[in-house]
Image (tube, rainbow, N blue to C red):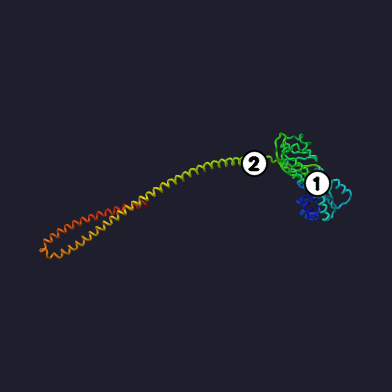
C-alpha cells in the first residue's frame, strides 16, 4: 500500500463534480494522495482548467452529469483536441448501456459508481495510474540512459561483436581513435585493432572469461590504422537473452594512451636520470680519490717537515742546555771565588774594626794626657790617617766586588731565564 500511495503522489488530478458534499469527501482523499488537484463544479470550468494546466494533468475524474457542459461532452472536446493519451475515469449513478458505451468510446480507463466506495475507489486509482507512473519512470530512465549514452560516447570507445568476435557496432570515438571508418570496421573481426606486442595468452584468458558469461577487464595495447599504438582500459560484457544464452559481447574502453605515454616518458626520464647520477657519482669518486691522494701526499710531506724541524729544534735545545749548564757552572765557580774574596775582605775589615776600636779607646785614654803624649798622639794620628786611607781603599775594593757580584748574578739570571 505504501508503494501504491507513493505512485499516486507522483501524479496530478483534474476533478469535476457538481455534488458538493461528495466533492468535499473526495477532495479530502485526493488532496492527501495526489501531488496537485484541480477542482471544478461544472464542465465549462473543468474544460477551462484543463486548457490552463493540461501539461501537468495526469488523470481526469469527472461526473457524467455536470451542469453547463456534461462530462461526456467535456471529454469529447478534450479527445478531439489532444487525442486519447490522457486517462479518464467517469463517475455516474446511471448504469445503462448507452452511457457506458459513450464512456467506452471516449477511451475511459474505468468508471466509479455512486455512492463511491473509497476502498474500491483507491484500487481503481492505482490500476489506472500505474501505467502512467511506469511511463513517467520510463521517461526519466530514458533521459538518464540518454545522458549516460552521451557521456559514454564522449569518453569511451564502445563496440559490440557477435559471438564470433565480428564487429556489429562501434561508436564515433572508436572510429576516431582507431582511424578506421564504419565501412572498414563493421563485419570485421575485432582483432583488426590487435597489436602484435600483446601476448596471445591475454586474449585466450579474455575469451575464456567472457564465454563463461563473466565480465573481463584489463589493459590492452591496440594498433590504429596508421600503425600507431593506443592504449585502453577495457571492460567486456557478455549480453544474454531471456534464456541466459550469450548473444553478443559489448565492450567499453577508456583511452589511457596519454597516461601510458606519460608513464613511459617518466620511466625513461628516471632511467636517464639514474644513469646521469651514476656517471656523476663515478666522476665525483675519481676526483675525490685524486684530491685525497694529493691531500695525503701533502700531509705526509708536512709531517716529514715537522719531524725534521722538531729534530733540529731538539738538537739546538740540547746544545743550548749544555752551553747554559756550562755557563752556569762557570759563573757559579766565579761566584764562589768572589764569595771567598769577600769573606777574606770581611775578615780584614773585622781586624780593622777591632784596631779602630782599640785606637778609639786609646784616644779616650790618652785624651787627658794629651800634652804628655802629643808626640805619641801625632804618631798615632798619622797611623790613624794611614789606617783610614787603608780603610777607604778596602771600602772601595768591597764596593767594586759588590758591583762584580751584582753583574754576575744578573748574568746568571739571564741564563736561567733563557733556559726556561
State the residue position of label 1: 86
- Whole-angstrom CA distance, mark 2 to mark 1, is 65 Å
Label count reads 2
Q: Which dot marks residue 186?
A: none
User: Against 258, is 40 above or below?
Assistant: below
Instruction: From the image, state whether disc 2 or disc 1 is nearer to you.
Output: 2
Observer-nearest residue: 42 or 346? 346
Instruction: Confirm whether residue 143 shows in the render.
Output: no
* Spot occupied by residue 301 in the image (x, y as percentages of width and height): 47, 43
Residue at 80% across / 39% down in the picture? 164
- Which quadrant holds residue 341? bottom left
Mark with earlier residue (2, 1): 1
Q: What element carries label 1?
A: loop
Q: Dot 1 surroundings within 10 Å: few (below 14), some, or many (20 or more)?
A: some
Q: Dot 2 surroundings within 10 Å: few (below 14), some, or many (20 or more)?
A: few
Instruction: Mark 2 and mark 1 in contact? Answer it, CB < 8 Å.
Output: no
Q: What element carries label 2?
A: helix
Observer-nearest residue: 189 or 127? 189
Query: Left or right: where does residue 239 sit relative to residue 300?
Result: right
* Spot occupied by residue 205 in the image (x, y as percentages of width and height): 76, 43
* Spot occupied by residue 239 in the image (x, y as percentages of width and height): 79, 44
Q: Quadrant of the N terminus?
A: bottom right
Observer-nearest residue: 231 or 30? 231
Instruction: Confirm whether residue 164 shows in the render.
Output: yes
Q: Residue furthest right?
A: 97
Observer-nearest residue: 406 or 16? 406
State the residue position of label 2: 267
Query: Left or right: where does residue 282 sit relative to residue 118?
Result: left
* Spot occupied by residue 389 in the image (x, y as percentages of width and height): 18, 56
Amino acid at each position: 500500500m505504501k508503494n501504491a500511495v507513493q505512485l499516486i503522489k507522483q501524479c496530478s488530478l483534474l476533478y469535476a463534480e457538481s455534488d458538493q458534499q461528495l466533492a468535499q469527501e473526495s477532495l479530502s482523499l485526493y488532496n492527501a494522495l495526489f501531488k496537485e488537484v484541480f477542482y471544478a463544479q461544472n464542465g465549462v470550468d473543468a474544460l477551462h482548467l484543463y486548457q490552463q494546466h493540461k501539461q501537468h494533468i495526469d488523470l481526469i475524474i469527472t461526473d457524467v452529469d455536470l451542469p453547463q457542459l456534461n462530462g461526456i461532452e467535456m471529454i469529447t472536446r478534450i479527445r478531439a483536441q489532444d487525442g486519447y493519451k490522457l486517462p479518464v475515469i467517469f463517475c455516474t449513478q446511471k448504469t445503462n448501456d448507452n452511457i457506458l458505451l459513450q464512456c467506452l468510446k471516449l477511451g475511459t480507463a474505468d468508471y466509479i459508481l455512486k455512492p463511491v466506495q473509497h476502498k474500491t475507489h483507491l484500487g481503481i486509482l492505482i490500476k489506472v495510474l500505474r501505467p502512467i507512473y511506469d511511463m513517467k519512470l520510463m521517461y526519466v530512465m530514458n533521459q538518464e540512459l540518454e545522458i549516460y549514452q552521451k557521456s559514454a560516447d564522449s569518453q569511451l570507445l564502445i563496440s559490440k561483436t557477435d559471438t564470433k568476435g565480428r564487429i556489429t557496432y562501434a561508436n564515433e570515438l572508436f572510429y576516431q581513435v582507431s582511424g578506421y571508418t564504419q565501412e572498414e570496421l563493421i563485419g570485421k573481426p575485432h582483432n583488426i585493432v590487435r597489436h602484435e606486442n600483446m601476448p596471445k595468452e591475454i586474449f585466450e584468458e579474455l575469451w575464456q572469461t567472457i564465454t563463461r558469461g563473466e565480465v573481463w577487464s584489463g589493459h590492452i595495447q591496440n594498433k590504429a590504422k596508421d600503425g600507431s599504438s593506443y592504449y585502453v582500459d577495457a571492460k567486456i560484457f557478455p549480453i544474454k537473452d531471456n534464456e541466459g544464452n550469450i548473444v553478443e559481447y559489448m565492450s567499453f574502453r577508456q583511452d589511457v594512451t596519454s597516461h601510458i605515454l606519460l608513464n613511459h616518458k617518466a620511466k625513461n626520464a628516471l632511467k636517464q636520470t639514474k644513469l646521469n647520477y651514476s656517471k656523476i657519482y663515478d666522476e665525483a669518486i675519481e676526483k675525490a680519490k685524486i684530491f685525497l691522494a694529493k691531500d695525503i701526499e701533502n700531509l705526509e710531506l708536512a709531517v716529514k717537515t715537522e719531524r725534521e724541524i722538531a729534530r733540529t729544534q731538539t738538537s739546538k735545545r740540547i746544545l743550548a742546555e749544555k752551553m747554559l749548564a756550562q755557563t752556569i757552572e762557570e759563573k757559579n765557580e766565579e761566584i764562589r771565588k768572589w764569595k771567598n774574596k769577600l769573606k777574606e775582605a770581611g775578615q780584614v775589615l773585622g781586624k780593622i774594626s777591632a784596631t779602630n776600636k782599640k785606637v778609639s779607646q786609646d784616644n779616650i785614654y790618652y785624651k787627658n794626657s794629651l800634652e804628655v803624649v802629643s808626640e805619641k798622639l801625632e804618631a798615632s794620628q798619622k797611623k790613624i790617617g794611614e789606617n783610614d786611607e787603608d780603610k777607604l781603599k778596602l771600602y772601595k775594593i768591597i764596593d767594586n766586588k759588590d758591583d762584580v757580584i751584582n753583574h754576575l748574578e744578573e748574568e746568571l739570571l739571564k741564563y736561567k731565564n733563557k733556559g726556561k
